[in-house]
Image: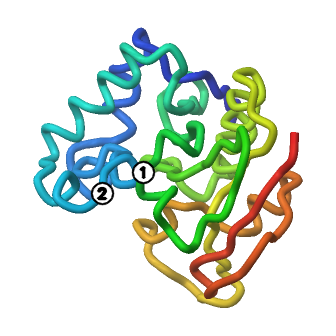
Amino acid sequence: MQIEVIPATADRWPDVEAVMGVRGDPSRCWCQYFRLRGKAWSAATPDTNRDALCEQVSGDRIPPGVIGYDDGEPAGWCATAPRTSYPRVQASPHWRSDGDTWVVTCFVVRTGYRRRGLAGPLLEGAVELAAKHGATAVEGCAVDLADTGRISSADLYRGPLSVFLDHGFTVVRRDAPAWVQVRRDL
């Protein structure tokens, strides 16, 4: 297994589509949940969410995340952006950050590539992307599997706490096993 993680830019859009797939939560959300609130989220459809992510990948000056390749095949995605890009994060009582903090909101690993250790390289790629664009810190809202036990892959979209801790993040606060805010200062 050889993992390569690259910022998701316009030329990588077909690979982002391959990772998001055609079924399951990623194919409906397209990493827009934290970018939309209230009526905007309620009115969103899988097609409008896909179009929004396509625009972010193709048109934004800063890529909205990174894509991971396993032996050259698109295998995973990690969404990250400045905190100000995520209205739901800014309004959430679970996230308390300041300054030029970036947030990791979502991991997607394709079926067939799970349990191969892809989340760590994806997280490290997201941190590198944030650092390159001036972030002073990166935060996440991890799931503590030691406290929650086994959960579905869909519920792991925010990432396991152990992966964050293994990559230099520290616990900032813990609201529940499924809501552990972590931070890595850059």
Q: What residue does disc 2 label?
A: 37
Side of 90 relative to 34 (left or right): right
Query: Between residues 173 and 99, which one lies in front from this camera angle?
Result: 99
The numbered disc on residue 133 is none
**What is the quadrant of residue 142 in the picture?**
bottom right
The image quarter in which residue 42 lies = bottom left
Q: Is residue 142 above or below residue 25?
A: below
**Considering depth in this image, is 139 or 121 the residue closer to the camera?**
139
Q: Residue at x 55, y 84 (%)?
A: 150
Q: Residue 128 appears at what percent x and percent y?
A: 75, 30
Query: Which numbered disc, 2 or 1, marks the residue that appears first in the sequence?
Result: 2
Residue 110 visible, this angle? yes
- Residue at coordinates 37% horizontally, 14% vertically from top-left? 59
User: Image check: 68 left or right of 152?
Assistant: right
- Disc 2 from disc 1: Cα separation: 7 Å
Which residue sits furthest top? 11
Q: Quadrant of the N terminus?
A: top right
Residue type, mark 2 in image: Arg
Q: Is residue 46 left or right of residue 34?
A: left
Name the quarter where the C terminus is drawn.
top right
- Residue drawn at 11 percent across, 53 percent down: 43
Check residue 87 in the rendering and tell me which mark sits there, or answer none: 1
Residue in view at x 66 percent, y 64 percent: 96
Mark yes or no: residue 76 visible.
Answer: no
Q: Residues within 10 Å of mark 2 (few under 14, many from 20)?
A: some
Q: Nearer the viewer, residue 130 or 106?
A: 130
- Mark 1, other Cα within 10 Å: few <14 / some 14–19 / many ≥20: some
Quadrant in which residue 83 is drawn: top right
Question: Where's residue 158, x and y in %?
Answer: 54, 61
